Image (tube, rainbow, N blue to C red):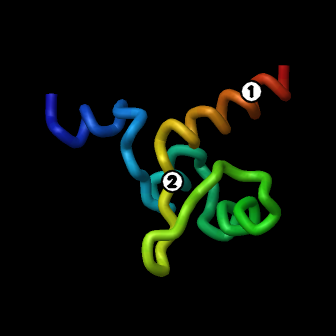
Amino acid sequence: MSDQATQGRDSGEIMTLAQVCDLLHVSPNTAYSWRSAGTGPPGFRVGNRVRYRRSDVDAWIAEQLARAA
């Protein structure tokens, strides 16, 4: 298995905005709107870039699924 495939399942993985948008099938504008409103997955800044912990994104997805049920 490639390092990249293994990394995708690592909950300690740090994801870029583009990776989160690809995973959630949303535009960067939507992700920025969620971040601004405090409703999306929690992110943090590294310099002038937004990054996300994979574990935080997974937890946010689980919360959304629980609310929808």
Q: Position of residue 13 (x, y in %)?
A: 37, 43
Q: Position of residue 60 (x, y in %)?
A: 67, 38
**Quadrant for the N terminus in the image:** top left
Marking on residue 42: none
Q: Residue at x 25, y 35 (%)?
A: 5
- Tell me the CA gap for discs 2 and 1: 19 Å
Q: Residue at x 45, y 54 (%)?
A: 19
Q: Residue at x 51, y 44 (%)?
A: 23
List the single residue furthest toward the bottom.
48
**Mark 2 or 1 closer to N-term?**
2
Q: Quadrant of residue 6?
A: top left
Q: Quadrant of residue 66?
A: top right
Left or right: residue 48 versus residue 37 is left
Left or right: residue 60 versus residue 4 is right
Marking on residue 52: 2
Q: Tell me: residue 21, above or below residue 23.
A: below
Q: Tell me: residue 26, above or below residue 8.
A: below
Q: Position of residue 11 (x, y in %)?
A: 42, 34
Amino acid type, callout 2: Tyr
Mark 2 crowd level (few <14, some 14–19, many ≥20, 10 Å Cα): many
Of badges 2 and 1, the one in the foreground is 2
**Quadrant for the C terminus in the image:** top right
Q: Position of residue 33 (x, y in %)?
A: 75, 67
Q: Tell me: residue 51, above or below residue 58.
A: below
Q: Quadrant of residue 65?
A: top right
Q: Check disc 2 and report its element: helix, strand or loop.
A: strand
**Residue bearing mark 1:** 65
Amino acid type, callout 1: Leu
* Figure disc tally: 2
Left or right: residue 14 versus residue 21 is left
